[in-house]
Image: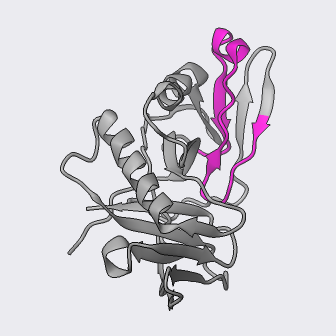
């Protein structure tokens, strides 16, 4: 059976508990994780990097989860998307101040780190060649980071909320249309929350030339590395 490898590089430092109802990580530690992608010099135009928080156990509630950057002169709420990802603020002031990234959960309930994924398109149209390139770019980055040895790109996966009615189709260059089947699963391999509606596009199962067309923007696009 094929095993999905995460479309994303997850560096997972342990949180240090500051209070009974909160958890935190040093901004400098997070900065050192996030800067890897910024300094990466190979092609990455189809990739994006977030700071991500995710539960260690599926019993940990994520509703109302908040991430805040706190320092002597800094107090900024960092919005999280449905998958716990935030745009990381590269701030010299926060670094010099040794600020903290605080979440409103007890210590040990969450894990955090840099998370690289494939960029979504607002028009919902993805050239098959671009998705292959995106997968290759992610694989190259993972190898640069010491991950994914012996793996190759098998496809990509589109994830939506559980009750979303969106559809994903493959449009071949000759005009034939193939509907991709939806199933329930995690947005990324290794996640404990596995209640998303996902569509798997395997490169070998469909013609090389064509487009993937989505009826709405997915929460995430993950790579299948096997």
Indicate yes or no whether the magenta region holds residue 215.
no
Which residue is at the front of the view, 127 or 175? 175
Q: Is residue 50 left or right of residue 187?
A: right
Q: In this view, does 143 lie to the left or right of 82?
A: left
Q: Where is residue 43 in the image (x, y as percent from the top left)?
A: 46, 38
The residue at the point 60 percent across, 57 percent down is 83
Q: Is residue 195 visible?
A: no
Which residue is at the front of the view, 196 or 158? 158
Q: Magenta stretch?
A: 77-106
The residue at the point 49 percent across, 75 percent down is 210
Which residue is at the front of the view, 145 or 120? 120
Please tell me whether residue 50 is drawn above or below residue 173 in the rendered image. Answer: above
Q: Can you say which quadrant of the picture contains the C terminus?
A: bottom left
Q: Where is residue 134 in the image (x, y as percent from the top left)?
A: 46, 53
Q: Is residue 184 left or right of residue 145?
A: right
Q: Where is residue 132 in the image (x, y as percent from the top left)?
A: 41, 60
Q: Where is residue 174 in the image (x, y as percent from the top left)?
A: 49, 85
Please tell me whether residue 135 is drawn above or below residue 116 in the rendered image. Answer: below
* Farthest-out residue, top: 96
Q: Can you say which quadrant of the picture contains the N terminus?
A: bottom left
The residue at the point 38 percent across, 79 percent down is 207
Which residue is at the front of the view, 114 or 223? 223
Q: Can residue 131 be seen in this view?
A: yes
Q: Please say which color scheme the image uses.
A: one colour
Please tell me whether residue 141 is drawn above or below residue 169 in the rendered image. Answer: above
Indicate yes or no whether the magenta region holds residue 79.
yes
Count numbered badges in the picture: 0
Please tell me whether residue 198 is drawn above or below residue 61 in the rendered image. Answer: below
């Amino acid at each position: 059976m094929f095993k999905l490898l995460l479309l994303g590089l997850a560096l997972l430092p342990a949180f240090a508990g500051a209070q009974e109802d909160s958890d935190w990580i040093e901004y400098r530690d997070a900065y050192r994780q996030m800067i890897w992608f910024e300094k990466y010099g190979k092609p990455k135009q189809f990739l994006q990097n977030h700071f991500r928080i995710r539960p260690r156990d599926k019993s940990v509630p994520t509703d109302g989860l908040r991430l805040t950057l706190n320092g002597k002169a800094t107090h900024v709420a960092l919005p999280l998307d449905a998958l716990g990802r935030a745009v990381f603020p590269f701030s010299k002031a926060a670094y010099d101040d040794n600020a903290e990234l605080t979440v409103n959960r007890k210590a040990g309930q969450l894990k955090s780190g840099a998370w690289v994924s494939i960029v979504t398109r607002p028009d919902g149209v993805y050239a098959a060649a671009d998705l292959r390139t995106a997968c290759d770019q992610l694989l190259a980055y993972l190898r640069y980071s010491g991950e994914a040895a012996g793996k190759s790109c098998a496809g990509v996966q589109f994830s939506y909320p559980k009750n979303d009615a969106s559809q994903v189709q493959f449009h071949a260059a000759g005009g034939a249309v193939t509907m991709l089947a939806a199933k329930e699963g995690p947005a990324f391999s290794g996640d404990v929350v596995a209640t998303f509606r996902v569509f798997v596009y395997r490169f070998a199962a469909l013609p090389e030339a064509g487009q993937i067309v989505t009826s709405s923007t997915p929460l995430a696009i993950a790579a299948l590395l096997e």
